[in-house]
Amino acid sequence: MNQLGQNILILIALIGCSSQVVIKDPSIPDLLIEKSPYNVAIIYPENFTNFIHEEKVIGRKSWTIDFSESNKILFNKVFSSFFSTADVFLSDSEINSSNYKFIIKPNIDVMEFSVPEQSQDETFSVWIRYRIKIYDSTGAELINWPISSYGKTSTSTFADEQDLARAAVLAMRDAAALIILQMEKSKIIEKS
């Protein structure tokens, strides 16, 4: 076999040993909550726009989960459902902070997952820990919440990629519910 043939076989083997999952929209249902009267500014970090988690399962294939815009979609829905106005900015320098009661800066601290080969059962699990920091209009930090979320699905007749994607979406929905619960019981964000 010539060098070109060997390279093609190596490429085929590598492609067969990796899986890619793309989360485009977590499709959370409409949130039936009473809105806070406050206007907020939201600043998303770079990793909300292009968060990609790559992991190699020991002795198995590598996995890539691309969250693309899905984190921003999720958090925009949560914050716009909870607050009177939720405007998105690229940085602090763009904000006239006197127009906003709070400035919210979410982040992704860590993301992990397990697949059936690791867990020795027929499930896919995803853990995501977000961090929500909320500042007042002067820039003083008021809240620093770690939000740990979890999603789990059983294997199905679908492809492994679809099962892992469903677990990731369930983890994102879990995060949305936890964020709403935290905001609902916060004395700092009391609704007037």
Image: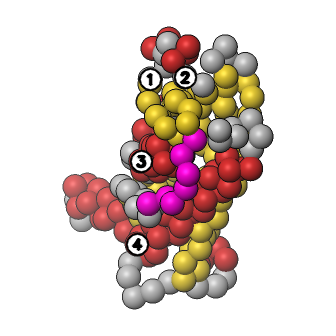
Q: Quadrant of the rendered structure where residue 173 is? A: bottom right
Look at the numbered discs 3 and 4 and tell me whether their residues touch, using CB distance below 8 Å: no
The residue pinned by badge 3 equals 73
Q: Main secondary structure of the magenta part?
A: loop
Region of the chain picked out in magenta, as a range: 30-36
Which of the two labelled residues, at mark 3 and mark 4, occupies the earlier sequence position?
Answer: 3
The residue pinned by badge 4 equals 162
Instruction: For marks 1 and 4, give the one nearer the viewer.
Output: 1
**Image point 40% across, 72% down: which residue?**
162
C-alpha distance separating marks 4 and 2: 40 Å
Q: Quadrant of the C terminus?
A: top right
The residue pinned by badge 1 equals 90
Closer-to-camera residue (101/3): 101
Instruction: For marks 3 and 2, give the one nearer the viewer.
Output: 2
Q: Is residue 126 above or below residue 49?
A: below
In the orientation shown, which residue stands out farthest toward the right?
A: 187
The colouring scheme, among rainbow, by chain, secondary structure or one colour, is secondary structure
C-alpha distance separating marks 3 and 4: 20 Å
Which of the two labelled residues, at mark 3 and mark 1, occupies the earlier sequence position?
Answer: 3
C-alpha distance separating marks 2 and 1: 15 Å
C-alpha distance separating marks 3 and 2: 21 Å
Which of the two labelled residues, at mark 4 and mark 2, occupies the earlier sequence position?
Answer: 2
Q: Is residue 128 above or below residue 107?
A: below
Look at the numbered discs 3 and 1 and tell me whether their residues touch, using CB distance below 8 Å: no
Q: Residues within 10 Å of mark 4 (few under 14, many from 20)?
A: some
The amino acid type of the residue labelled 1 equals Leu
The residue pinned by badge 2 equals 100
What is the total number of numbered labels drawn onto the structure image? 4
